[in-house]
Image (spheres, grey):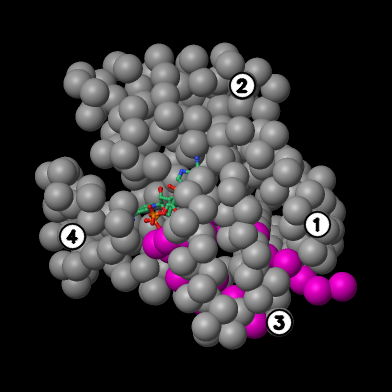
Amino acid sequence: MANVCVITGGGSGMGLETARNIDKDVILVLTGRTVSKLEKAKEQLEAEGHQVHLIACDVSVRKDVHELCLFADSLGTIKTVIHAAGLSPTMADAEKIIMVNAVGTKNVNMEFYKYMKDGGVIVDVASSSAYEAPGLLIKHQIFEEAEYKEDAFVRHMLGEANLAGDDYNKSGLAYCLSKNFVVWYAQKCAHEYGPKGIRVVSVSPGLIETDMGTQEVEKSEFARQMIERSCEHRMGKAEELGFAIATIADARNGYLSGIDVLIDGGASTGKKS
Ligand SMILES: NC(=O)c1ccc[n+]([C@@H]2O[C@H](COP(=O)([O-])OP(=O)(O)OC[C@H]3O[C@@H](n4cnc5c(N)ncnc54)[C@H](OP(=O)(O)O)[C@@H]3O)[C@@H](O)[C@H]2O)c1
């Protein structure tokens, strides 16, 4: 049976660049909400020699993620899941951000776990913003509600995000908290799935030159400061992250699990110094 790699958010940015670095004998399943975007990515990847399937899926909808799993499972053995789908503060309100970034990650990990076997890996894309969430607002008792009390989880996360002033700041805080959840949840899953031979790793990119990153730089002073704080005073390139994420997912990295990999060009250490 062929090996399958599923990439959420695979139609653009880091998801698409990761796909480029996956072995060509692996069947790629790209997913996202916009079919035209996925079709364009499929065309590009096929021209580069990849085998590509696509299916629309909104990761915040559990039923969609279940159908994505069934589709991927019908193509071969699901070995790799790159969960790159996400929304940034300029793209959506606080509730939508929590639904897509946090609930979406819970949906992806919980559903794929049922279909994956020994040697599988899930890479959840978080963000260096996870480390910007105010410590007082990071409440693991709220995070623990995600799997079994989704409504309460969303309500409580939203309550925290709404402590910020205007709508943009509410979305910003929701983003930081949702990505802090991703880091926490990936570690929780790594310890739960490890005995079945499945690795789970989160990756926290700094500011990266994708549609999303560029949009943040235009609108956010904080994003512009991140460029200044990085060692080379620049944004990361989507292809740099694509290579890093694919490397993390590579089976030869078998002992990499239960940890967040921060790839921010030194912006966080620049802040400290
Ligand atoms: N760029 C940065 O500076 C930066 C920094 C730190 C972390 N990140 C994270 O990195 C990941 C990839 O972002 P990117 O920079 O590569 O931006 P991007 O090109 O905008 O990619 C995000 C992808 O997620 C998909 N998506 C959004 N909502 C979705 C949903 N509900 N269900 C399924 N797919 C959905 C989008 O496609 P559709 O709209 O068609 O669904 C899009 O293809 C995100 O999780 C982001 O939060 C980005």
Q: Where's residue 218, x and y in %? A: 14, 50
The number of discs equals 4
Asked whether the residues under the numbered discs 2 and 1 touch, taking CB atoms below 8 Å apart as contact, a structural biologist would say no
Task: Report the Cα–Cα distance between label 2 and label 1.
Answer: 26 Å
Q: Residue 150 bears which disc, if any?
A: 2
Question: Between disc 3 and disc 2, whose residue precedes?
Answer: 3
**10 Å crowding of disc 4: few (<14), some (14-19), many (20+):** many
In front of the other: label 4 or label 1? 1
Task: Report the Cα–Cα distance between label 3 and label 2.
Answer: 38 Å
Task: Report the Cα–Cα distance between label 4 and label 1.
Answer: 41 Å
Q: Residue 73 bears which disc, if any?
A: 1
Which residue is at a point 36% across and 26% down the rendered structure image?
Answer: 94
Q: Viewer-proximal residue, 114 or 203?
A: 114
- In which quarter of the view is residue 27 placed? bottom right
- Check disc 4 and report the residue beneath it: 227
Q: Evaluate whether residue 84 shows in this view.
A: no
Instruction: Say what amino acid the circle numbered 4 marks.
Output: Ile
- Check disc 3 and report the residue beneath it: 25
Instruction: Say what amino acid the circle numbered 2 marks.
Output: Glu
Q: Does residue 169 appear to the left or right of 243 in the view shown? A: left
Q: Quadrant of the N terminus?
A: bottom right
Q: Evaluate whether residue 219 shows in this view.
A: yes
Q: Secondary structure at mark 1?
A: helix
In front of the other: label 3 or label 2? 3
Part of the protein shown in magenta: 1-24
Q: Secondary structure at mark 2?
A: helix
Q: Viewer-proximal residue, 58 or 115?
A: 58
